[in-house]
Structure formats: C-alpha cells, structure tokens
Amino acid sequence: MVFPAPAIAFLLLTMLFPVAFTLYMSVQRWEFSALDPPTFIGLRNYADFLFNDARFWPSVARTFAFTLLAVAVETVLGVAIALIFNREFLGKGLIRTIFLFPMVATPVAIALVWATMFDPNLGVLNYFVEELGLPPVLWTSDADWVLPALALVDIWEWTPFITLITLAGLSSLPSEPYEAARIDGASPRQILWDLTLPMLRPTIVVAVLFRAIDALKTFDIIQVITQGGADFSSETLNIYAFQNAFNYYHLGYASAILVFFFMLVMGVSILLLRVRRAAE
Amino acid sequence: MSTGTAVATGRRSVAAARARPGFGGLARRVAFYALVIVILLPFLFVFYWMIINSFKTLVDAQAWPPKFWGFTPTLANYRALFQDPANPFLDFTINSLVIATGATLLGLILGLPAAYSIARYKQNGLGLVILTARIMPGISFLVPLYIIFSRLGMIDTYSSLIISHLIVTMPIIVWLMVGFFEDLPRELEEAARVDGASMFGTFWRISLPLSKAGIVASAILAFIFSWNNFMFSLVLTSVNTKTLPVAVFNFMGYSSINYGAISAAAALITLPVIVLVLFVQRHIVQGLTAGGIKG
Amino acid sequence: MTTSRSRRLGGAALNRRQVLGGALGATGLILTTGGRSPASPSAAQATFDWKKFDGSRIRLLANAHPWTNSVKPVLAEFQELTGIQVQAEDLPEAQFRQKLTTELSQGTGSVDVMMSAPAQEGLKYDQAGWYEPLDRFVQDPALTAPDYDFADFAPRPIEMQTVNGKLIGIPVQLESTMIIYRKDLFEEKGIAPPATFADLEAAAEALHAPDDRLFAIGLRGKGAAATSQWSSFLYGYGGDWLDPAGAPALASQPAIDAFTYYGNLARNYGPRGVENNSWAENVALFQQGQLGILVDASVFKVNVEDPSASTVAGKVGYAVFPQGPAAHDVAGFTWGLSIPASAKNKEAAWYFVQWATSKAQNLALLQKGVPVARQSTWQDPAYVETSNKEFDQAQQTSIQISKHTSNPPVVSVQEVRDAVGPVIIAAIQGGDVPAAAQQANETVKTIIAQSG
C-alpha cells in the first residue's frame, strides 16, 4: 500500500522520537542539568507517583471530574439545542455561523477574556450574579467552584460543536420510522425518546469521543486562568506534569506522569470506541 | 457527498417538518425566537465583552459597576499594539500566515492519501496511529521537538514550525476526510478502474474532485487549528518566526492586569479567524458534520 | 504558578510615547551630564575599545519585565556603540522559564544573555552549571570600561546576585516588600503609616468598609505566589524558612504566628476571593480605589501612579514594611542579567550586560519608575528633581534593613513555595494552621532531601 506511506513516514518521524524520548526519560532521573546526565532509576518514578505523591491521585480525579462535567453538560445542552433548532426558521444559517465562533476562536485569547470576567471583585459575572440578588461567587478563588468555572469555559467553547454535529445527524435520519410511528399514534415525547435519540446515538457517541479526548487533555484554559489554583483545586494531570517538568525541573518524573496520562486517555478512547461499535 | 449536501442545503427531514410551528402559532413563534435569543446570548456576550472592553481605557475597563455602553471609546489599546516598534505585528501576522498555510498544504498532501486508504481499504491500524497523534499530550512533544530541531539547526525557521504544526493539522484532515471518502459512490471509481485508470489516477481524477467540499472544509479547520497553536510555536520560534499567538500572549502576559489591552489583543487574534469563518462557514459546517457523523 | 512571581508592569509601560519619552530623556541626560555614559566618548573612554566585538551577534532571552520594555527601544544605541547586534526575545515569566530551561538543558549555546532572578532560581541554575561567573569580566580592565564603577552597586543586591561565592549576574532591578497606601484615606481617618504589625492591623480595621467596596488591605492569597510577600511577616516574627541546621522550620512558633497573623489580616480586612489574588488582581483593585493598603513589591509604584490606569494616582503614600514583634526585616528581590556557561559569545555578551547596567541605563530605568540597584542613580539630580521623596526614603530604608530575600534558600524554590502555599490558604480560611504547617514542613523536608 503506497498511498499512506508519506503520512506514515511523517508520523513515525515526528512521533517516534518524542514517544521514545518520553518513555526513556520516564525511567531516568534528570533535572535538566548540563553537569549531571540522566541516571537510570528503573520504575522508581512510576512507583513514586503511584504510591508516594499526595498531589498525583487528586489530579487524576480532577482530570476526570472536569471531563465528565464538561462533556456531560455539553452533550445534554448541545443535543437539546440541536432539537430546538431542528426546524426551518429565519436566521438559521446565521445561527449556525455564530455557533462556529466559540470553537474556532483562539483558546489562549478566549481564556484571558474569561479570566477577566471571573474576577470576584471587578469581573462582570459577579455583576450579573449580584443583579440577580444572589451573593457573589468566588469563581476561580473558591476550591469548590474552580473546576465548574473552568468547565463552564469549555462548555461555552464546545457545546456548539455537539449542536452542529447533532443537527447534521438529525437531517440525515431516515423518514420511514417516523411515518410508521405517526401511524401508530406515538406522542412527540415517545418519538423523541424511543426513536430520535436512539437513532442519533452513533453520531453523539463519536462527538463525545472526540470531546472527551480533548477535555482530558485540556491545558491552555487552565494554564491561563488558574495555573492549577486555587490551592491546587484545578490541578489536572496535564498541569501537574507541566509543573513537574518546567517549574520543578523533574523531567524524568514528568515524563513518567505523561506516559501514565497517555495510557489513561488511550484507555478512555478505546472504551468509547467499543461503545460506539456497540451503538452501531 | 450525500450527507454534506443534505446539511448544506438544509433539506428538511421529517422530524424537522413535524416540529414546524402551525397556523395560529404567532405566540409560539415569538416564544421560539425568544428562546433562540436566550440560547445565543451567552455565546455572543463573551465576544461582545471582549470587543467593547478593547475600546475602553483601563479605568473604564475596571470600573464598577461594569460599563456595558456609554463610555468614551478609545483606540489607545489598538494603537499600543500596532505602534510599538519592538512588536512588529504585521511581521507576526505574516509568520502565522506562512506557517498555517504551509502546515495546511503539507497536511493535505500527506493526509488525503492516508484518509483515502483508510476509507477504501479499511486501514484501521493507520487510523489508530493517527488517533495516537491526537491523544499524545502536547507537552510530551516540547523537549523532544526542541532537541530534534536544535540539533538540525532548524530552530526559528519556518520549516521546523510547519513540520511541528503538522502534528496538529494532519490528524484533523484525516479525521474529516475519512468520512467524506467513505460517502463517495464507489461506482464511479470502479468504472474508472475498469477503463484502465491506475489506483492513483482514480484517486486523483475521480475521488479528489468529488470531495472538493470536504477538502476545503478540512483545510480551513486545519488552518485555524494551526493558527491558534501556542505550545509548539512557543518552543520553536524566536525573533524571526514568532507567531501571532505567542506575540499576543506575550503582550497580554506583561499587562495581565490591563483588561482593555488584553481584550484588544484577544480581539486582534480572533478577528482573522472569525472573518475566515464568515466566508466559508457553509463548508466548515459541512466538513465538521460529515467527519463527525462518520468519525 | 511562577507567573505570580512576576515583576511586570501594566498599562504604564505599554504607552509608546512614554517609552520613547523615556529613551529621549535618557539621551538628554547623556548630553547634560557630559560623558558619564558609555554612549558618549570621554577622555577615560578613549582607552576602552567598545568596538572590540564589532560584527558579533548575541541573543538575549528575557522575561517580559519593565526592564525589557525599557531596553528594547534603545538597543540600536548599543549596536551603534559596539557594532554588536542584539536579538532580543522576551516572554511572559512562565513561558520565559519554560523556554530558557529547555534551551539551557541542551547546552547548544543558543542564549548569550539571560534575565535571571537568583532568589528564585540561583541555586538551581548554579547546580545545573548554567551560570558563567562574572567576576573575571568585572575585574578585567580590557573588558570593562573604566567608568563602569562596579562599587556603585549597593552591597545588598550584589550579595543577592552572588551564589556559592560566584557573582552570577548584575542587577537591573531591586525591590522590596513595601506598604503602599492611600494617603487621602489615611488622613481622613487620622491614622499614620503603620510602624508595627499591631499598627497595620489597627489601620486595616479603621479603613475596612466592604459595603462601600473599600477593602482595607491587599495581601496576596494565591498559594505559592503569596509566600514571597508572607515571608516578610515570617522574618518580623523572628522566623526563617530553615533552622540553623538547614532543616525546614515552617512549623516553628514564629512561622505559625506569621501564618496566623497574615491569614487573619487577609480574611478580616481583605477583598473577597483573596485566595486567587496575586499581585495583578490586587494592583488592579488598588488602581480602582477599592483597596486602602497594598502590601506588595515596591516595583508596583509605577502602576498605581499611572494616571491612564489608576484612579488613585497622586494620592498614594509609601512606607517601610512595619516592624515585627521580634525583628525589623523585609524581603528583598532582584532581577539581573546573567551569561549562560554555554554562551558562544561571552565577551560580547558581557559588553551588553555592562552597557545595560551602566549609570546612564540605570537612570533611564529609574526615571520610568523601576527601582534600580546603583546607589548614585538615586542621588542623580536628574532623578531627584522630580522624584517622590517618600518613596525614595522607603526604598532606601528597606534595602538597608533587608537581611533576607523573599524566597526559601533552597534549590527547589518553586516546589517548596507550592508546598507552603496551602498553609497560607488554610490560614486565610481560618483552618487548622499548626496542622497545615506541620504537614507542609514534612513535605518540604522530603523535597529538600530529594532535590536540595
């Protein structure tokens, strides 16, 4: 097969070395020093973070909590909005265009705008909250609020993606089952739950798969808005690995965490691919 | 192309027809549009806030209660961006354009045949490798890429940036195009093969022209993701190839308390992407959804 | 989290006119003071060969800092004087460190001059073999201009730029924790600048009016970022990061007192959500007139005095950090220019470092509001003419009494700061401080045992 050869060659070239380097580093101790070359320490890095690091497991849990929260809300909201928009009305094309904006806007820039909006004293979000007569929210300063706040940014960016994909899925559904259902006198609610949603499932699962991979890997918005704060309560695996590599100079340790992280994302992807196959 | 066309032309499905408001539905129609506006508001507000703040002085931008309108607009934030001789934003924009274009074109050259063979010959192993590229955490590339390109003496060159951005662009192109190629009617290709066309000839003369819409869509998305990339650009650029996100982030970084300046920089970098989307939105929707449905 | 350690300017430095104005100011001074600057040849200069490395190229990697903003527009002057071309690249602090670490670790010699803050990374960089000692350049008359006057630098910043007995950088900026306060509000309430910790708390109590959106005191609350400003309180209670034997002393009584006092102050008289506030958030609040007192680095004077960014410009007073129950000490901090051991053009790099830290450049910096390390600059008539005497006084006294930097004297500075941050947050939230301190102390013990 010659067709994919250039692509394979490229991927091997650009990915093989980084993968090999990360694997190699993950069994070394190296602190970026020019004087002390890496020393082989076996699996000690892995053992250390698995059994001996108070910040590691909480960061795993946060990674999943952030992903679950963001992707669940995106899916429910995204599908719901698609069902609402699934009719002909004036301005539908315009709305589809507007819905593209959040996901193509530069994440670093958008994150900075959100950071200014989250400010507990000067930010516009608390102005709205106070206008509603509610007590101000501390957003990124509050250990309980910071993950939902960051998830909110992700939801803002990516709900439209689910909506657009679902809209396309809706428009390509076959019409026969609906006619049959109408003859049987099914209620709109029954049609939605027993017909539309099951038929949409393969589409939604694919969208969820890609969202889940990206949400697990979220880096830009957390690094810009909180850098893992307040008090580590938004420190996900990706952020923790970055801290270890570039702020603590433990490149070996960070590499081991990255290997673990990679396997984790891979595991989730395979799981979702299974679900997808089952759905089909 | 069937799926894509269906979406683009907004073919009414039965489900859509069923949901259509009836005769005396003026009240319902008003309620519907009210609902649409409520849904859109949060998405639009962030952009509104970014743009409006970019025209405020620092004092206005940090004012309490926040000023939604009724302040004296200033261009000072944009002037500061453009007139700083140490920050040639035009150069940064050109760098970003060259790199994103290069990474997109190369991504197409490498990605289209790969996507085609995945779609036609079920090369799922290759699909898995490309999925792996998507799964790898970005930070695990940083040090290795620097090592490779510094040993090759390619730091701060367009080539190194284009190659590194391919890690971002190629998987997108492949992911979207597999869906497109799978939708192509096989009959045309088979007819061409019967007429004696080579495999490559079939791909080149039959399959590619039929997938034009998908190619445009995936190219645009690849371009946008390359344009937005910050991580690889940061490590591999220096003074000669600095891209817009790195430059703008730098500007935001040291003025991180200046809401107006942050907003101007954010608006400046977002604007080209938004304009691009406005021109080609139909293709993107088509591409995203085709790729999304087929996966 | 290193971003929070930043020393960057806000809107002030962005204004191009001001930048150019500063540069012009500096040029004007060179003319009037006649030949003190290396840019204008004098009798003494005639013997020093500024063109020795004509045609070289050097690369500068810098933090996006007021110093960088100030020097970038005048790089052409350096090139004219020496014929050395400078490629200057600056990035926000977190990205700057990431890139510098990556490049230095490969030893490819890609960086000739770098900005470095020894209190943050001095021991680490020295351990990694990244610093070229500068003593030999300073002492070499063939490489250092006769009017450079190294002795003019205050002893304290030079001490801070000396790591394991080697001079590893020349300071471009020198700051300390300071009391930055609203003069008008203090007068209104009839209170004087605080001289002791008790005064500080009393002043905060008198000023605090959260219902009118006036919070008495801006202290950093964001974990690791807060440790640098908290450290002055630690020293005031007679504590230190390590005990004389080198073991962490963060659960000692002075440390617990400092955590508790700091946490109470922030909780009772601070803005809401102070746990995510670093300097940027607090400076913004102060600029908006929502803070009575800002306890932070003296370098932020330029932000609060910038009329285009601050609603309180001209109403600001400055006082030395107050005396603690056990000592009168305050944390100092300095950024300097260093030469990596792997640099390819060390001599040309040194030419740049000495030009950038010359008297003329120091004056230009100080006139833009960046506190500098040369003593003569603070007395220069061109500066004194328009300077804020209260600030000058507070800055000079701070440097005189300062016996510590703002960071722990260890290799793993950031890791230790991250470990101590939670204690500050526990203190702000009214948690169990002794238990949190004990836990942090154990963590720090492990970190020091592993990495130093």
Image: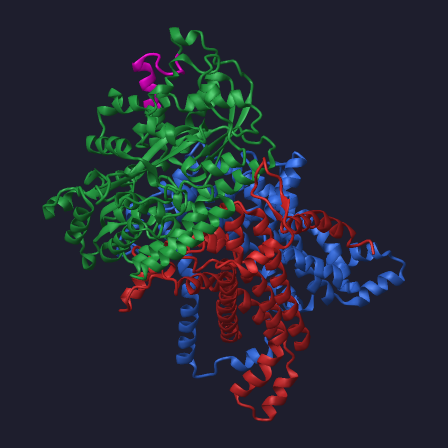
For the point 30% across and 32% down, the residue is C369
Residue reaching furthest to the bottom: A184
Vertical position of residue C79 compared to residue C130: above or below: above
Q: Give the range drawn in magenta.
A: C24-40
Position of residue A129 in the picture relative to residue C324 (left or right): right
Where residue C402 appears, x then y in whole percent?
29, 35
Residue A72 showing in the rendered view: yes
Vertical placement of residue B181 versus A107, above or below: below
Tell me the colour chain A is drawn in: red
Quadrant assignment for the N terminus of chain A: bottom right
Inspect this view and state whether residue C373 appears.
no
| Residue C183 picture quarter | top left
Asked whether A192 falls inside the magenta stretch, the response is: no
**The C terminus of chain A is located in which quarter?**
bottom right
The hue of chain B in the figure is blue
Q: Chain C is drawn in which colour?
A: green
Closest to the observer, B212 or B263: B263
Left or right: residue C284 compared with residue B244: left
Judge from the rendering whether residue C178 lies leftward or rightward of residue A117; answer left or right: left
Given residues B224 and B25, the one toward you in this image is B224
Total numbered labels placed on residues in the image = 0
Residue C151 is situated, as x and y percent measured from the top left of the image, at 35, 19
Q: In this view, does C187 lie to the left or right of B204?
A: left
Residue C32: in magenta span: yes
Report x, y in % for residue C387: 23, 28
- The chosen color scheme is by chain
Horizontal and vertical percent position of residue A16: 70, 50
- Of the pair C362 and C251, the residue shown nearer to us: C251
